[in-house]
Structures are given as C-alpha cells and as structure tokens.
C-alpha cells in the first residue's frame, strides 16, 4: 500500500548540530509539506514543495531548509539545532492543492 | 493574513452528551475549511471538509461566512471520539491555495 513514512521517529541531538529528518511518500504526490506541532500553536508550516526542484518557505522557516530532488522525498534539515526547535515534526503530502493532506507518523525531536 | 482560532484547548463531556468544538477564522478571500483529527497513537487525518457537506462518524460542520465560523458538532458523543481536533483553512485560490493554516487544536475527552 502507498504510504508516507518519516525517520527517525525519535531523535535527541545537541545544540548546534545539523540534523536531517527524512520524509518519504509512495503515492507519487507532487505536493509535500513540513509542519511542526507545538502546544498552544497547533501545526505551523515550515516549508513546502509543489514538485521536483521546487521549494518554498512557510510560516516558520528560519533555521530550516529542504530540498526536493525527486518526487518521493522531502528531507528537512536543521542547519544548527536550537532548543527552540524541540518539537514534533510532521510531513504531509497531497495529490491536489485541495487542502486534503496525508500525514506521516511524526518525528519527535529533542534539542538539548 | 489568514488565521484560525480554536478558543478551547480542552473540552470534556460525558458519553451521550452533545459536543461542539468551536472554530473561527479570518481570511480576506473565499476560504475552504477542514477538520482534522488525531486519535491517540494515530496519524493526523482528515475528518471532514465544508465543501463536502457530509457527516463523518456523526460529526457535522457548517461554514458560517457571516460569523466566520466552522464549528464541529456531534449530537451524542462517544468515548472513541476522544482525540485532538484541529480546524484548518486554505484559500480557494491564489498564493495560499493548498497550504493549510491550522488552529491551536482542541483536546476532546469523552468520559464514560
């Protein structure tokens, strides 16, 4: 079955380190999104992509970057991890730009 | 700028009681509204969207453009409805199309 996966599911890292979170989908969706989930803020959009070689900044993109070299993957990189980036990160994909998105299981990142 | 507000962080009801999760939005154009749900240890998933005008798991939501609201209602809550609920919005066109803006979320607990 087609699905969307994230790895790792849990990660602990130190302040200042570079971290990459993986997102892989097998639906062949053009649209992919990264969100962070924080209590009191809900989900906030970090970066998104509408296709290969296309990337765009979302609401809270500072300190994060993405690249889209193929349809299946949209890795999220924290250039220099900060404690404020401790959060749960969700990747999502969609076939159409209709608002119906399919979410991955999430990655819980702790920056110490 | 588009914004979604869910005024209640926590909502507790007893089984069989009616439940209403509030959602208000601000958007200058024509919005499309959604409710997403995250059950314990499950992925975030779409519950319903206003354009479908359907009832899912007994839940309904009506878009009230005059009051800029999209409240989620169920006449008789069940214990399995306990979850985190997010209201989300996307613009029906333009640069915000396909990008979701989420509210802060409401944790619903249905007591036996």
Image (cartoon, coloured by chain):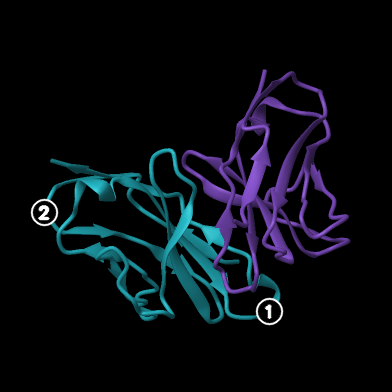
Mark 1 or mark 2, which is nearer the start of the sequence? 2
Q: From where the camera sits, is residue A59 visible?
A: no
* Residue A102 left/right relative to B95: left
* Residue A60 left/right relative to B34: right
* Residue A100 left/right relative to A96: left
Instruction: Tell me, for residue B34, which label it has, or none.
Output: none
What residue sits 71% from the left and 56% below the top? Answer: A58
The extreme front residue here reads A1
What residue sits 49% from the left and 62% below the top? Answer: B88
Instruction: Tell me, for residue B94, which label it has, or none.
Output: 1
What residue sits 12% from the left and 54% below the top? Answer: B17
Q: Residues within 10 Å of mark 1 (few under 14, many from 20)?
A: few
Q: Secondary structure at mark 1?
A: helix
Counting from the top left corner in percent of width and height, residue A75 is at 78, 45
Q: Colour of chain B?
A: cyan
Q: Up-down: is A45 above or below B35?
A: above
Q: Quadrant of residue A53?
A: bottom right
**Residue tagged 2:** B16
Q: Up-down: is A78 above or below A96?
A: above
């Amino acid at each position: 079955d087609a699905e969307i996966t994230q790895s790792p599911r849990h990660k602990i890292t130190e302040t200042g380190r570079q971290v990459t979170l993986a997102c892989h989908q097998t639906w062949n969706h053009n649209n992919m999104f990264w969100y962070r989930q924080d209590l009191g803020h809900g989900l906030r959009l970090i970066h998104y992509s509408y296709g290969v070689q296309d990337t765009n900044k979302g609401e809270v993109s500072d300190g994060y970057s993405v690249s889209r070299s193929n349809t299946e993957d949209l890795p999220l990189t924290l250039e220099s991890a900060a404690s404020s980036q401790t959060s749960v990160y969700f990747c999502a994909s969609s076939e159409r730009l209709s608002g119906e998105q399919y979410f991955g299981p999430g990655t819980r990142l702790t920056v110490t | 700028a588009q914004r979604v507000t869910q005024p209640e962080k926590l909502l507790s009801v007893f089984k069989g009681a009616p439940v209403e999760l509030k959602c208000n939005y601000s958007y200058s154009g024509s919005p499309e509204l959604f409710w997403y749900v995250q059950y314990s240890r499950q992925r975030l998933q779409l519950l319903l969207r206003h354009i479908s005008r359907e009832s899912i798991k007994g839940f309904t939501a009506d878009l009230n453009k005059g009051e800029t609201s999209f409240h989620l209602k169920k006449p008789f809550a069940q214990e399995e409805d306990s979850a985190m609920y997010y209201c989300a919005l996307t613009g029906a066109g333009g640069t915000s199309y396909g990008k979701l803006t989420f509210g802060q979320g409401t944790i619903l607990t249905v007591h036996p």
